[in-house]
Amino acid sequence: MPIYEYKCSNCGHQFEKIQKFSDDPLKKCPKCDKNTLNKLISSPSFRLKGSGWYETDFKTGNKKNILNKEKDAKDSNKSKKKDKGSAKVSNEK
């Protein structure tokens, strides 16, 4: 269940409330008992990043695991550069 943030426009009381998506927004302030509550829009305190579910699930064909393909391409380029660098060192001997 999501956590919603509310603030009373009368007394300034601010609090969080765990509610279902289907629940109606709160209207009455628990501190001053007036119908002056406003639901605030705030960003979540976490961020989904990395190769989690959103990267790998629900994709088809060539779009699947794009992150891994890009990483593999970068790694192969790095190893090619290292090979060229080691070849230069061996030529200097």
Image (cartoon, rainbow, N blue to C red):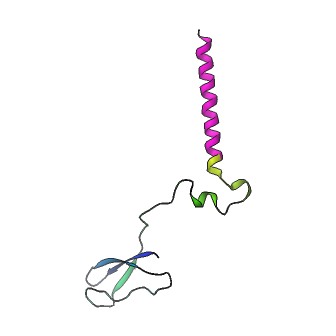
Quadrant of res 13 = bottom left
Measuring from the top left, give residue 43's x and y in whole percent.
43, 67
Q: Kindly give the residue lying farthest to the right in the view shown.
A: 61
Q: Residue at x 59, y 26 (%)?
A: 82
Q: Which residues are magenta?
A: 69-93
Total numbered labels placed on residues in the image: 0
Lateral position of residue 87 relative to residue 1, left or right: right
User: Is residue 81 highlighted in magenta?
Assistant: yes
Quadrant of res 25 = bottom left
Q: Residue at x 47, y 60 (%)?
A: 47
The quadrant in which the C terminus is found is top right
Measuring from the top left, give residue 92's x and y in whole percent.
59, 10
Q: Is residue 87 above or below residue 19?
A: above
Q: Residue at x 72, y 59 (%)?
A: 60
Q: Kindly give the residue lying farthest to the top in the view shown.
A: 93
Q: Is residue 36 above or below residue 44?
A: below
Taken as a whole, is the magenta stretch helix, strand or loop? helix
Q: Is residue 85 above or below residue 9?
A: above
Q: Is residue 83 above or below residue 18?
A: above
Quadrant of res 35 = bottom left
Measuring from the top left, give residue 65's x and y in whole percent.
65, 52
10, 30: nearer the viewer: 30
Q: Residue at x 39, y 86 (%)?
A: 26
User: Is residue 39 highlighted in magenta?
Assistant: no
Measuring from the top left, give residue 8's x and y in whole percent.
31, 82
